[in-house]
Image (cartoon, rainbow, N blue to C red):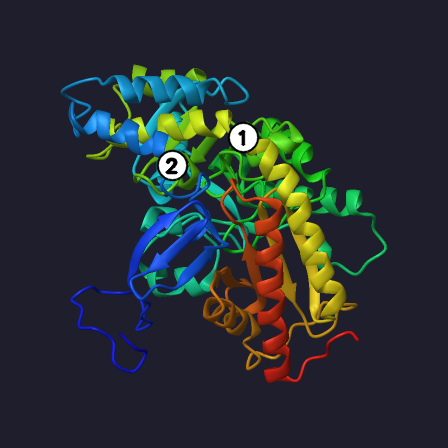
Amino acid sequence: MTATDPRPSHLFYVTRLRRPLVDRAEGIYLWTQDGRRFIDGSSGPVAVNLGYSNRHVLDAMKAQMEKTTFAYRLHFENDPAEDLARDIAGRMPNGLDRIFFVSGGSEAVESCVKLARQWAVATGQPGRWKVIGRMPSYHGGTLGALTVTHDGQLTGPFEAQMKAMPSIPAPTAYRDRDNLTMEQRGLKYADMLEEKILAEGPETVVAFIMEPIGGAATNALVAPDSYYPRIREICDRYGILLIHDEVMSGVARTGKFLGGDHWEGKPDIVSLSKGIGSGYMPLGAMCAPMRIVKPVLDMGGFAHGHTYAGNPLACAAGLTVLQEVDRLKLADNAAARGADLIAGLQSLADRFPFIGDVRGKGLMTAIEFVADKETMRNLPLEVNIGQRVLDLAYERGLIVYFRRVKGGVQGDCVMVAPPLIVTREEIGEIVSILGDAIAAAAREFGLPVAS
């Protein structure tokens, strides 16, 4: 297969871009059928936390396959789902000990939103239906998840089909040029939530949804420390549920089991996916406390569900993924190797003046390209450097993640988020290849390079 003569396919790919056929994968590497090796520097879409072909997970899946691959939740209970729910509940903060399984991140977020709404109805608050989000943000691709996603590139074509929810600005304090400290900026952004609640009418707002560490729409955005407790305080003040979307930042990715754990976050509901299945099986979960679940059950049950909820094969894989996260001490490795990665990315920022920000926690990191580091002015749209760096890295055998973080139309970023099993030497290789790709892009676009 070549770019000009791709093999015939009946698959509906999301674009006309074609890629080589994969042959096998192990650790942080994948090989194509033509023998090329790739380093997965983005864990797929920041999902393959455990890396590829872990023998313990494969053995657990095989053992479960020999028993049953499916048992519908309305007909049977199954041990893998029970055991995985118990394991997850033991890792959750704030008494979130009721676990609802789904097949992916969009389903997990929609489950959170629907539970919040049904809880409001069940507790005599039917006027509460609005879920405030952040602009920009990304919470999933289904219509329900898109209502709380605020990114025009993703929501624009579908706005006529959904009821868009209110939003506040994401806490992009690193771009601000004012006389405030970072602590003051964090409070400023958090206080925008209270302003929005009052503008909408507190009696109409049921929840606020946020990614503790930004994902696709903001690429590893970390708010100032002061932001997180103030958000919790505001939600408590107005009786609003706080939903943490941990689909990308959860399962040890940032050096803690949940991204919000860095600030002792106390969410009311949490969504998980990606790392919990780690690419071995489609799997996600909503985590909630009994104080929210009980009124819904008392009213007759949760008006929600999916065919593959609590699938025994998926849950057997997920349970072993979490056991391997513990056995291999991957939260600790994410923290240590994340420090190495941030240092490496900072060295690239010193080399390339058009890298305006290096950010993230653990092995969820990003660099942002700018025209002017002092003002954070964007590069011209025609300088599509993020996409070009992604392509040049791919040509060199490194996969990274690219997206524009100003509503999807400006603010070129590249996210680097390798599997949590990555070594210090592999981090060095990732940074080296990425540096070569950025240097090649700089030459093409005539951008400065430090001597």
Q: Residue at x 53, y 34 (%)?
A: 252
394 and 248: which is toward the camera: 394
Q: Quadrant of residue 383?
A: bottom right
Left or right, residue 155 beside residue 387: left
Where does residue 384 sit, x and y in percent of width and height? 54, 76
Q: Is residue 118 in view?
A: no
Report crowding for label 1: few under 14, some 14 to 19, many 20 or more residues within 10 A (C-alpha).
some
Residue at image location 21% in from the left, 17% down from the top? 77
Name the mark nearer the viewer: 1 or 2: 2
Quarter of the image holding residue 441? bottom right
Q: Is residue 418 left or right of residue 183?
A: left
What is the x, y in percent for residue 96? Answer: 47, 21
Q: For the residue labelled by badge 1, is the local secondary structure a helix, a strand or a loop?
A: loop
Q: Is residue 255 above or below residue 385?
A: above
x then y, percent, for residue 166: 50, 49
Residue drawn at 56 percent across, 48 percent down: 214
Where the N terminus falls, by quadrant? bottom left
Discs 1, 2 touching: Cβ within 8 Å: no
Q: Quadrant of the C terminus?
A: bottom right
Amino acid, disc 2:
Asn
Question: In what element is the residue under mark 2?
Answer: loop
The residue where tag 2 is placed is 54
Residue 29 image point, x, y percent: 43, 52
Is residue 26 visible to us here?
yes
Dot label at residue 145: none
In this rendering, the answer to whether 266 lies above or below 398 is above
Task: Say which mark, if any, is on residue 257.
Answer: 1
Q: Nearer the viewer, residue 353 or 376?
A: 353
Q: Nearer the N terminus, badge 1 or badge 2?
A: 2
* Label 2: few (<14), some (14–19) or many (≥20) C-alpha neighbours in 10 Å: some
